[in-house]
Amino acid sequence: MRLSWQVALGESPQERNFPGPAHRGLVAASAACQFALMIEAKAADAADDLREGEVAIELPAGFDASLYYIGRIHTPWKRREDCPKNPRETDAVCTVVVDPRWVAGLQGLETVSHVVVLYWMDRARRDLVLQAPHHYAELRGTFALRSPVRPNPIAVSVAGLVGIEGNRLSVIGLDCVDGTPLLDLKPYFASTDSVPDAAVGWHSGRKR
């Protein structure tokens, strides 16, 4: 079951119907209720969706923060199972569409070669602490994996910037389904972001 909800306050129907500064509290409360309903609906179906050995926990009753979707990402993949395992497995050109209100924030980004793209994996469950990814042989803790299934399903990719036209960025190096919400864009600095000798010890183990 999938319920839709809107985090960005600026475009919600509640805002249009209740103008003025006091309405934001009402919108936030409404969003919190929708979050709760979404989690309850997903929990009803989640128990039968665990792989062997996986462990799910009860999520906290409330949220600690809110966020804005600043746009959407358009990719060739309509289903999660069609997506590449990681951004380096594809050379598909994807389109990042930034909401018009944020377009001034793109000034200067056209000079970079690579962009750090943060996005919200809105189809992922959020309650697993131990996972059995189908392409690995052993259980791993959620925080030892790059799986989209995590308490806050934030994904990050370093994408090559092909070009910018208005509020649309053409990039190579994403792995998400079409329509994925966009959280943030940052320039990639090889001088500070690259760690060539970084290692993940368990990753050298045999895969399925």
Image: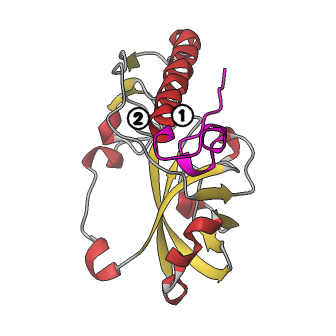
**Residue contact between numbered discs 2 and 1, judged by CB atoms under 8 Å:** yes
Could you say which quadrant of the image residue 172 lies in?
Answer: bottom right
Precedes in sequence: disc 2 or disc 1: 1
Task: Provide the residue designation for mark 1.
Answer: 124
Instruction: Residue 73: say if magenta.
Output: no
- Residue 194 shows in the view: no
Image position, residue 27 (x, y; %): 52, 35
Image position, residue 207 (x, y; %): 45, 40
Q: Is residue 26 above or below residue 8?
A: above
Looking at the image, residue 38 sits to the left or right of residue 59; the answer is right
In front here: 109 or 85? 109
- The residue at 55%/60% (across/down) is 87
Query: What amino acid type should be assigned to the residue bearing mark 2?
Result: Arg
Range covered by the magenta-colored residues = 1-23
Image position, residue 112 (x, y; %): 48, 85
Q: Is residue 63 above or below residue 198?
A: above
Image position, residue 177 (x, y; %): 66, 48
In front here: 182 or 28? 28
- The residue at 30%/72% (across/down) is 193
Q: Which mark is residue 150?
A: 2
User: SS at mark 1?
Assistant: loop
Q: Is residue 159 above or below residue 136?
A: below
Quarter of the image with the N terminus in it:
top right
Q: Label 2 crowding class (10 Å Cα cut-off): few <14, some 14-19, many 20+?
A: many
Give the CA distance from mark 2 to mark 1. 8 Å
In front here: 97 or 50? 97
Could you say which quadrant of the image residue 137 lies in?
Answer: top left
- The residue at 47%/46% (across/down) is 21
- Residue 139 shows in the view: yes
Magenta: predominant secondary structure element? loop
Q: Label 1 crowding class (10 Å Cα cut-off): few <14, some 14-19, many 20+?
A: some
